[in-house]
Amino acid sequence: VQLQASGGGLVQAGGSLRLSCAASGTIFSSNVMGWFRQAPGKQRELVAEVSSGGSTNYADSVKGRFTISRDNAKNTVYLQMNSLKAEDTAVYHCRAWNIGRDYWGQGTLVTVSS
């Protein structure tokens, strides 16, 4: 397994969760790392991404609530999710990509109850 996501679960609206995605060193070091999500009946969408240099980008819907970070020593990317809303309910997927490379991890389900 090259990308291993964890941390999903059931949380009440307003609560927090932290997702983790552990990657092999060869994948992690030179790739953009990001989180995507797919809700039932909807297309997969970018949630947040972080470059190898630490630059970040967020979907408008999560700005101010979610924070993406990467720990280069642990080859792990995190998604801290605060002030969760029912509309954040989705399967969250970790991805690593660059020119000519594209890796996806298995999804982790986040369910936010209202």
Image (cartoon, rainbow, N blue to C red):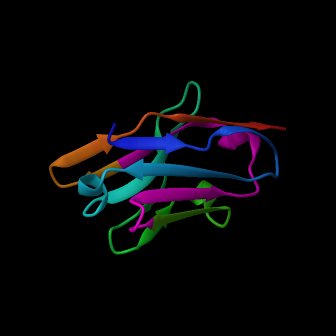
Q: Position of residue 51 (x, y in %)?
A: 35, 67
Quadrant of res 90: top right
Quadrant in which the C terminus appears: top right
83 is within the stretch colored magenta = yes
| In-front residue for pair 76/91 | 76
On the image, which quarter does residue 50 sit in?
bottom left
93 vs 24, nearest the viewer: 24
Image point (29%, 57%), residue name: 25
Which residue is painted at 56% across and 24% down in the image? 41
The answer to whether residue 95 is above or below residue 73 is above
Q: Is residue 66 left or right of residue 59?
A: right
Of the pair 20 and 33, the residue shown nearer to us: 20
From this viewpoint, which residue is outermost toward the top? Answer: 41
Residue span colored magenta: 71-95
Q: Residue at x 74, y 50 (%)?
A: 84
Residue 28 place in picture, x, y as percent: 31, 58
Specify the farthest residue to the left.
100
Residue 59 is at least partly visible in this image: no
Which residue is depicted at the point 32% across and 42% down?
A: 2
Seen in the picture, residue 89 relative to 60 is either above or below; the reply is above
Count of numbered tags: 0
Q: Specify whether 110 is left or right of 73.
A: right
| Residue 20 visible at all | yes
Screen quadrant of the N terminus: top left
Query: Left or right: 64 with respect to 113?
Result: left
Query: Would residue 75 be counted in the magenta stretch?
Result: yes
Q: Position of residue 9 (x, y in %)?
A: 69, 37
